[in-house]
Amino acid sequence: MKRNSSATPPRWVESLLIRVLPPSRRDDIAGDLCEEFRARRAQGAPASFWYTRQAAGLIGRQLYGGGKMRTILLAFCAFTLLACCWLTVMEGVLRHPGYPARMIMDGLLGVGSLLTAIIVLLNAATGWRWLGLAAALGAGAVGVAAIVHNARAPHFEGFAVVIGAALSMQAALTLWFLGFRRRSEHA
């Protein structure tokens, strides 16, 4: 059956929503949203934007509520910790000018990743959360700086973009997970 684009929500949004929802709720939630989409479309309202906004909210709540956001953050922490260990070893092996300072920075970023993972795993108290937030700000700044510096450099280093992006994503997830959730969710 051919889908009528005017009577159905954006396919990519609907597909993403269905993949994220638990199997027991897929038909109910997707069906209700589709009915409301059709009703809004029939009234001439901007239904695609409404549907996308509603789906984005549900996807975000599902990822967080199901513990998936925590898992994603921990995966980023593990990746950046391993990347920082690799960078530290490579700096020591290659010994390019200024390597001791970069080794220290790589080590501190790795410690920040490890600290963030421990804080998340143990659901640590507020004092530790502030330390995790500070580490996230530092990692985010270094990640963005690495991407910008690499984009302006005459020699492109792909690993710098990947690690910089991972540090930036870890920082954003940490800021959200430790800082911007409602206080009642911390307990």
Image (cartoon, rainbow, N blue to C red):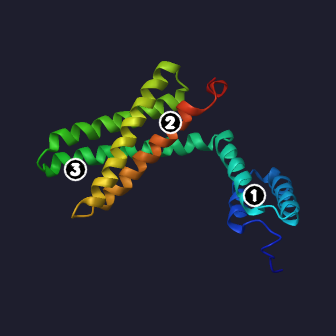
> Along the polypeptide, which appears first: circle 3 or circle 2?
3
Q: Disc 2 on helix, strand or loop?
A: helix
Give the spatial CA distance, label 3 vs label 2. Answer: 29 Å
In which image quadrant can residue 49 be found?
Answer: bottom right
Give the spatial CA distance, label 2 vs label 1. Answer: 27 Å
Q: Amino acid at mark 3?
A: Met
Tell me if residue 116 comes above or below residue 140 in the rendering. above
Q: Position of residue 86 (x, y in %)?
A: 29, 48
Q: Amino acid at mark 2?
A: Leu
Q: Residue at x 22, y 64 (%)?
A: 155
Q: Nearer the viewer, residue 123 or 93?
A: 123
Q: Position of residue 79 (x, y in %)?
A: 42, 47
Q: Position of residue 162 (x, y in %)?
A: 38, 56
Q: Residue at x 28, y 54 (%)?
A: 149
Q: Which quadrant of the figure contains the N terminus?
A: bottom right
Q: Which residue is mark 1?
A: 51
In which image quadrant can residue 26 be found?
Answer: bottom right
Q: Nearer the viewer, residue 73 or 6?
A: 6
> Along the polypeptide, which appears first: circle 2 or circle 1?
1
Label of residue 90 in the image? 3
> Residue most toward the bottom?
2
Other-residue count near label 1 (Cα within 10 Å), few / some / many at <14 / 14–19 / ≥20: many
Q: Which quadrant of the figure contains the C terminus?
A: top right
Give the spatial CA distance, label 3 vs label 1. Answer: 48 Å
Q: Is residue 15 visible?
A: yes
Tell me if residue 130 comes above or below residue 147 in the rendering. above
Q: Position of residue 71 (x, y in %)?
A: 56, 43
In which image quadrant can residue 109 be found?
Answer: top left
Q: Amino acid at mark 1?
A: Tyr
Other-residue count near label 2 (Cα within 10 Å), few / some / many at <14 / 14–19 / ≥20: many
